[in-house]
Structure formats: C-alpha cells, structure tokens
Image: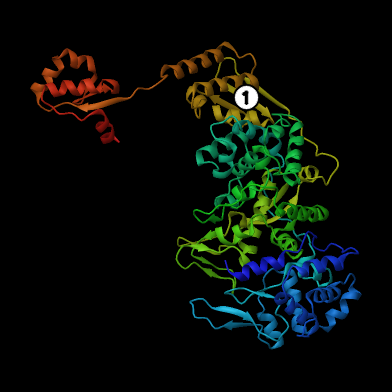
Amino acid sequence: MSTTYYYFRKLTDGGNSRPGERRDQHQVDRIVGLLQRLTIHELGPIFEALTGEKKLPQPKEKLCAVLASLLDFQTPEEFLPLWSALPAHLRDAVTLGTFEEWFDPKPIETAHGIVIVAKEKSYGYRQKYRVTPGIRLGFFVVHPDRPLLAMPGWLRELFLPFMPKPQAWTLAPLEKKPGSTWSNEAGIIDGLPLLLRALDLGNGTRDSWDLSKKGFNKTEIARLRSTSGIPPFGQAAALGLDSVELLARFLACFAGPGVRKKFAIQGGSTLEGLRSLATLFFSEQAGKGNTNEELRSGRWLETAVLNDHLSRKPGTQTNFFGEAPPSRRELRLSLNALAELDDWVDARGLFDWFWVHLCSMRCFDDEDEGWSLHLRGSRLDLSPPLDQESEWNAQLAVNGPWRKELLARPLFEAYCYLLAVLGFVEIAEGEAPRRLLKKGQLLPISPADALVALRLTKLGRWCLGYDADPPALETAHYEAIADPELLVVAFRGKHLELRLYLDAIGTPLGEERWRITEAKFITGCDSIAAIEKRIEDFRRLVDRAPSPRWERFFALVLERAAALPSRRAAWIVPLPKDSATREALRADPKFRALALRVEDGSVVVRAEDYAAFAKLLAAYGFWAPTEKRGRTALR
C-alpha cells in the first residue's frame, strides 16, 4: 500500500464522536488533541487553507491552539466569519469533501477556471497526481493514481453541521408504491422453526462455522426450501442470492442454543425468538465472549456471509472475529429513519441519505480492505475517473474511491435482503445494473444490486423496538382427514408444516387432496430412520390413530426399505473366449464356489473372493491383475 493511503487513514481517524453530534464545552481540547497527533508538515496546509498565511506560529503547541480556536464553531453565527473569508473554490471543495469520501474536482476547476489536481512527472507506467501548490487546498489528500481528492474525516465531522445540505440529506418516501413486492412477514412465523429443525444446528454432520462460511449446494437448498416453505427472491435469485440459504447461514451465526430455546414449532414463541435475534444482531455485546456462539455473532457474519461478492488474495489472513462492526450501528441509523418515515423508500436514495450522514459501512480492518480484498473481474464501468481495468490478474481494487460502490453499497443492500428474509422489511426488486465485466460477461457487482425499494413491516417495527404491541398472528385453523380405505389425505385450512409434509409424501389431486404412494412416500429419504420419521410425522400431523389400511401401508414401506439393507462390493470379470476353457472352468467346483453368477460371458465375484479367483485363473494359465491394480483399473 502507498504512503498516501496510510496518511489518509491517519487523517480520517477522528476519535469517538458521532456525525452531527453537538459538541460540548471541551471542544477546543478535543480538537487540540486531534491536531497534536499530526506533524508540522501535515498541520501547515490546514493553517494556510484557513488563514491564507504560509508562516506558521511556533512552536507546534501554539499552532495547534490557533487552529483549534479557528475550528471551534458551535453555531452558524460563529462559523459564518471563517466560511465567508475562504475563497470560493475552497468553499466548494470543502462542501464536496464533507459529503463524499472521495470526489472529482473537475466541476470546481471548470467553475473557477483553475487547475486543482495536476499531473506529476512520472517515470513509471502509472500516471501520478498532486494538488496544485498555492491554491490553499494542500490539506486534501490526492489519490495516488487518480485525479480524486479526499478531506480528512475529522474535518468532515467538524464542518458537517454547517454545510449547505445536498438533496440526498432529506429522506423522502416514494411517490408511488411499487407494483410487485417480496415479503416473508407471514411465512417466517411458521417457516423459521421448521428451518431450524431441518438445519439441526449443533447436531448435524457439518458444524455451524462450516455452514455459515461455505453455504449449501443446490440439493441441500432444495431440501431446506421444501422443509421450511421460505419463498425464493425474485430478481436476486436469478443472480445467485437464495433466500433460504441466506437465512440458514445467518442462523448458523446467530441461532445458538440460547436463542433456539425461544422458538417453538407452532405458537407465539416464534415472535419472541425473532425479537431475540434482532436484539442480538444489534447488541453491543455481539461478538464478545469466548464461546463459539458468542464469537459467531460478531463480525463473522459480515466477513463470511454478507460480502460473498468479494474475494480474498490467496495466502492472506484476516481477523474474522471480534465485536459487531460499525456497519451494524450505522444500519440501525437508517432503520430509525425508515421507521420514522413509515413508508416505501427508494433503496438507492436510502443509501445515499445514509452516506451523506457520514456513515461508511466499515466492517473490515483497513489493511484487509486495502490489500487483501478485491473484486474478481477484468473491467469495472462506473463513471470516469472511477472506471477500472485489471492489468493481468482479474483483481479490481475495492478500497479508497471504489469502496462506496464495491463494498459499502453492496453490504448495505445485503443487510436489507437479510432483513427481508427475516420478515422485518418488505422489498421491491428490479433489473440490476450490469457494470462488471467478468469472464466475458457483463454482470452486476453484487446479486443484491437488484434491490429497488423497501419499507418496514409490522413485524419488523415490533422486533426492532419501534412499536410496543406485537403484530396480531392469524390463528391456524385446519382440518386433515386420512381416508380409512384409500391412500388419500384431505386437507383444508392453513398449516404450513402440514402442507409441506403432504407435498413431500404425496401427489396433489386438486387443491385439497393428496394421493400417497410407496414411491412418493420415501422420496427424499436417505435412511430407514428418515422413513420412520415420516411415519411419526403422519401420526403427529394427520392422524394420531391411523386406520388398519394405513398401518399396513406403513408396514409395507418399512418392509421394502429393509429388503435391501446393505450393498456389497463385487467384481465383474469377463471369461476367456475359448469355449473349451470356459467349460473346464464351469466344471471346476472351486470356480462354482467363487462365481456368483455367469451371464453374457462374464462372472460376478465378491471382492473378498477376488484373490482366490485370480489364483484359480492362474492355474489355467491366465494372468489376472492383483486386487489393488484391478481396483485402480476399474476407477
């Protein structure tokens, strides 16, 4: 990484104050403390920009005190004299720099007829840039190889309350409600407990770390969806973002034993479980502790799940553990604004509002973000001068001026999709902009780019603490009747688990009847225990005392399942073509004892008998490969 990058990080480290927070009586002392961390070389351009003077007060302590007094404005009346004394191009640069981490100074250069960023003489293959001396903009950081500027973060915080606000500063509802929307508010109440049961966290063959990091294959996703009934996303699903997989990976991070106790298969306790998940997700205690459950609730979710569109350089390490990242606290600020508006909001507009309030969605270490992480692709089409082309390794940078579109916005949108599958927000989707060239295809930067609009649901308002009363749950009224003579089940009403169960074991006959067959009943079962579990579910969900016809059906299914309890390894060996030799072998008692079946000129030999069979063939003058070599050949 360049020294300019480290210098920028040093300047942007502005302490613990929050954006727009009203400063207290000790503001001067705080500013002095920030200034004393900088060198004379770094303080000089700030003094020149504010005063127009190049000669600095000495010593450094006096310089810091003078700058602190200039920057200690707590009301617009105190700020106006300093602001009015600045040249117009400097005011424009400060205004842009306050609301954007990196900005293009070209509009300011055009408006004022000056050159702000000039090309530097370079003997390498990359063009370098510098700020033009003498125009009082020396405290801005210029990007190493792009004509872009950034203002120190602590100065952005100081100037923010007094700047003329951009259009994105005020959040407004959509004028027209989206036509087609996606919501899981109704399905999550019944579906989440079923998904937790199917995942069997803590008891399955894969641990929660592996589940959350690597996800699931298509077969596993189909099984989880058929078990839980979680509907797929719309546009995002076509781009590779699956709703049930996203929820399952989230649960692998957050639904430890303490949370799972609050869920029930049916009933209002699911609401309490959802609220517990929301509380833990935004808690300051998330990620703190020593147990696996506590560690996974921290930044692991962001590093292992929500930034799947990014890649990491081979061999690089990162700190996957730790407390919840600042991005979650910043997400909560946007949810507060969404709750206050209580209407549909444009997703890009909400992120832009979020961004100009100096929220930056940070969840990685600076070194990790600047060195290890990258976006796989050969070209990125944003807008000049932010376009990127990979020189040889198909790795596009995500830090600096690109982090807004390649890291911050995709993470914000991924958060929104996670909140949607939890039932907390309702979303609308559209065609995702395709700006990334990868393997000859023009693709979206992230599958979450399909997000268009969102609003909080009643369930989300209660789980996130904005409403005091929980949403009313629809009482499950249903009736299931198993025909005593025919293998047909009739079902009427609303019961998600029962409907999913009938879809798994039977073939629909219209909307309210299912025909059950032996073949359909065992479809998807990988063991006799799984078949027995389906029989138990029939007694629990359909009929506690099935008729004799159903009991015979269950007995037949189990009998057929047990008919082929295991399989044995065997060899298929072709016999010699010579008919006389074949007849001699068939007459040999040892051959008849070793050969299980003779058909189409070949015999079947048990694997454990192969060595004796090869020895028998050798007695007739035929060479046979050893078992080890034979296995290799068959592969």
Task: Classify 333 as above or below 115.
Answer: above
Residue 207 pos. (x, y %): 57, 35
Identified at 75% across, 77% down, the residue is 46
Q: Is residue 508 visible?
A: no
Q: Find residue 231 and report its image quarter.
A: top right
Question: Given the current orientation, which residue lies at the most extreme left position?
Answer: 580
Q: Is residue 317 visible?
A: yes
Residue 309 pos. (x, y %): 56, 55
For the residue marked with disc 1, what is the amino acid?
Ala
Q: Which residue is mark 1?
A: 490
Out of 527 and 25, give the one closest to the viewer. 25
The quadrant in which the C terminus is found is top left
Task: Classify 454 as above or below 86.
Answer: above
Question: Given the current orientation, which residue lies at the most extreme bottom position?
Answer: 113
Q: Give the total of numbered labels.
A: 1
As drawn, is 603 to the left or to the right of 529?
A: left
Q: Find residue 89 and report its image quarter.
A: bottom right
Out of 185 and 414, give the one closest to the viewer. 414
Residue 11 pos. (x, y %): 71, 68
Label 1 environment density (alpha carbons within 10 Å; few <14, some 14–19, many ≥20) = some
Identified at 68% across, 84% down, the residue is 109
Element assignment for label 1: strand
Q: Find residue 368 and report its image quarter.
A: bottom right
Question: Given the current orientation, which residue lies at the most extreme front position?
Answer: 59
Out of 518 and 369, give the one closest to the viewer. 369
As drawn, is 585 to the left or to the right of 153?
A: left
Task: Classify 595 as above or below 463.
Answer: above
Identified at 60% across, 70% down, the residue is 3
As drawn, is 198 to the left or to the right of 527?
A: right
